Amino acid sequence: LLGEHDETESARDVHAAVVREMFFDPEPVPSLFSVAKPDVASRFVAEIDNVRAAVAWMFETGDLSAALDIGEAVSGLLFENGYVRESHGLRKRLLAETDEASVRRAKVLRGVVYPTATLEGLDRAMPLVDELAATADALDDDTWRAISIERRGVLAALRGDFAAAFEHWEDAMDRLVEIDRDLALWPLGSMVQMASFVGNFPLARDLAERVVAENRVAGYGLAWFRMGIAFAAAADGDPETAEFALALAENELAPGEGPLEGSREIRALISLARMDLDEAEQRAIALLDVARQTRAPMSLYMAILLVGLVRYQREDFVIARRYFAEGLADARRLELGPYKRWFLAPHAATFATTDAAECVALLA
C-alpha cells in the first residue's frame, strides 16, 4: 500500500514502527483466549492493508526481529477474520526466516500447530510440537514446556487418541497450576472443546460450567467458556440453555469486541435443535458459503455437517449423503479423528433404509 503511493523508505520505517507498537505483545506467554487486546482487534480489519504493508516491509528490509514481535498477533487476527491460508503462510515464513530460540518463536510455534494439522496433516504438525518442546528446553522455561505438552494433547485428540489427549492436558494443567493458576485454564479449554468434538456434551458442559461457577475468568475468557456451554447444549438438543448461555457470552464482550468466533455456528445449531429447518438451512448455507472461501477447518466442517443434517431432517437423504461424504473424505485425507466421527454416524444413517450393509460398514 505504501509502495503504491511512492512513500519514502523513511516513511515506511515510521509506518512499520507504528504497526509494531500497535501489535507488539511483550508478555512471556500469549493470551489465553485472544491474540490481541479488544481495541487492537477491532481496528485490525480497517487497518489490514496497512498491517500487510508493514509486515512486508519488515521482511524486505530484513527486520526479522520486528516481524517476530508482531507475527503471532497478526497471524492470529488474520485467522480469526477468515484469512486462514494467509495466516498460515505468515507463520510458516516467520519460522523459515529464523531459528532463534526465543519466546517470540515459541509463540509462533504454538500458533502454527493446529492449522498445520488441519490444513496439511498430522505428520506435518508433530515436528513443530517437538521443536516447541526443544525451544522450551533451550529457554529453560517450565511454562512453555507445559504448553508444548498441551499441544501434544491437541494432536493426540485430532488423531482420535482421546485417552492420550486427556493425559497430556492433565499433565499440562498440573504443571501450570504450580506456575500460575489461571494458565491452567488453557488445557482445560482444550478439554472442553475436544469433549464437544467427540460428542461427550455432558462432560463439555460440566467442565465449562465449573470454570464459570468458580469465577476464574472474566471478559472474553468468561465469554469463551459460556460459548462452550452453549455449543454443548445446542448439539445435545437443549436450545433454551444454549440460547441463554450464548446471550450471556455476548454480554461479556466489550464495546467493539466480537462477534465471538463460533457464535454463528451455534445459532444454526440452535435453530436445528428447535427443528426450525428453514432458519437452520438459511444460516447453514450462509456459513458454508463463507467457509468454502476461507477454508477455516472447524467452520468448514461444521457448515458441511449442518447443511447435511438439515437435508437429512427434510428426508432428502441423497443430498444429505453428498455433504456427509464430502466432510468425511476431507477429514480422512488429513487423518482428523474427531471430524471423521462427526460425519460417520449421519452418513451411515442415510443408508439405513436403502443399503443396510453400507450402513453397518460405516458404523463399524
Image (cartoon, grey):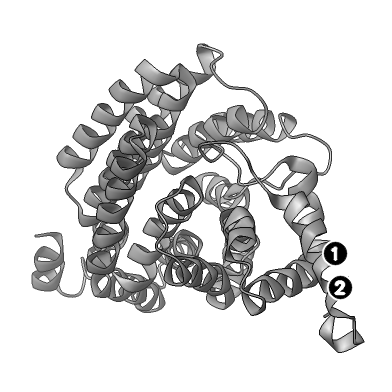
What residue do we see at 47% from left, 45% from top? 103
Q: How far apart are marks 1 and 2 (CA)?
A: 6 Å
Left or right side of 58 for 112:
left
Q: Is residue 338 visible?
A: no
What residue do we see at 40% from left, 41% from top? 193
Residue nearer the viewer, 64 or 314: 64
Mark drawn on residue 14:
1
Q: Quadrant of residue 55?
A: bottom right
Residue nearer the viewer, 36 or 353: 36
Type of the residue with mark 2: Ser
In this rendering, the answer to whether 287 lies above or below 342 is below
What residue do we see at 71% from left, 51% from top? 23
Type of the residue with mark 1: Val
- The secondary structure type at the circle numbered 1 is helix
Crowdedness of circle 2 by 10 Å Cα count: few (<14), some, many (20+)? few
Find out whether the residues at labels 1 and 2 contact each other: C-beta distance under 8 Å. Answer: yes
Residue nearer the viewer, 16 or 223: 16
What residue do we see at 71% from left, 29% from top? 252
Q: Name the residue under label 2.
A: 10
